Amino acid sequence: MNYVKRSILALGAVLFLGVAANHASAQTTPDTTKKTTTTTTTTTTTPAPAQADAANVVQALQSNADYSTAFDLVKTAKLDSTLAVGGPYTIFAPNNNAFSALPAGTLDALKKDPAKLATILKGHVVTGTYDKAGLIKALSAGKGKATINTLDGQTLTLSITTDKKLQLTNAAGKNAQVVLFDLKGGTGVVNGLNAVLQ
């Protein structure tokens, strides 16, 4: 029990430090003695957003080049029109490296079968906003674990790994870790994954 509380607190601290570091990188500090302005830049390795809010969650996905494959697949599966309105939605989008790691021919086969592709992609989308704050809240309420339902009714389980990473696990037992948080759009938010949940 104490381990779970420490894990939640540690994850919360890591996420808070990432947000604080990003906020610090955008601040400017005036030097009143010289009447000039100096910009302070801070680098952080914590996953964090780098883009301004987009009009919708699909545009938020498109705004980051590391997720261009996911964006193309959403369009191929014709989910872009669904996700661009209504919501809010949270897309747990695999990055380009995650799609590259699939067995040879898998991606091409999925592109030729939009219905199957749509099913797989819906397993990465949930209704509701699960940005950093929402994920921490869900994990705190669940004492280190939480479940959320995807668009096609599957269950995703959120948990914290022993090395303090946020992990998603689908019903088939496939795991992926969150490597990017809070690409925001008008209809939701995108969080990046390092693996495809299929």
Image (cartoon, rainbow, N blue to C red):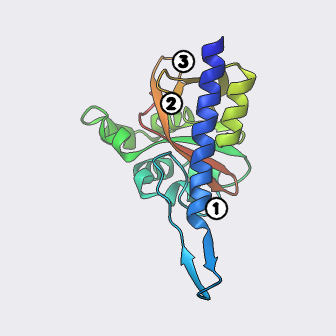
From the image, tell me which residue sits under label 2. Answer: 165
Camera-nearest residue between 166 and 71: 166
Camera-nearest residue between 23 and 171: 23
Crowding near the residue tagged with mark 2, few <14, some 14–19, many ≥20 C-alpha atoms within 10 Å:
some
> What element does badge 1 sit on?
loop
Residue 171 numbered tag: 3
- Looking at the image, residue 27 sits to the left or right of residue 177; the answer is right
Q: Quadrant of the C terminus?
A: top left
Separation of marks 3 and 1 at Cα, in angstroms: 32 Å
Crowding near the residue tagged with mark 3, few <14, some 14–19, many ≥20 C-alpha atoms within 10 Å:
few
> What element does badge 2 sit on?
loop
Which residue is at a point 50% across and 30% down the rendered structure image? 165
Of the numbered discs 3 and 1, the one sitting upstream in the chain is: 1
Q: Position of residue 9 (x, y in %)?
A: 65, 29
Q: Position of residue 155 (x, y in %)?
A: 62, 22
Does residue 16 appear anywhere in the picture? yes
From the image, tell me which residue sits under label 1. Answer: 53
Q: What residue type is labelled 3?
A: Ala
Camera-nearest residue between 150 and 46: 46
Q: Where is residue 184 in the image (x, y as percent from the top left)?
A: 63, 54
Q: What residue type is labelled 2?
A: Lys
> What element does badge 3 sit on?
loop
Separation of marks 2 and 1 at Cα, in angstroms: 25 Å
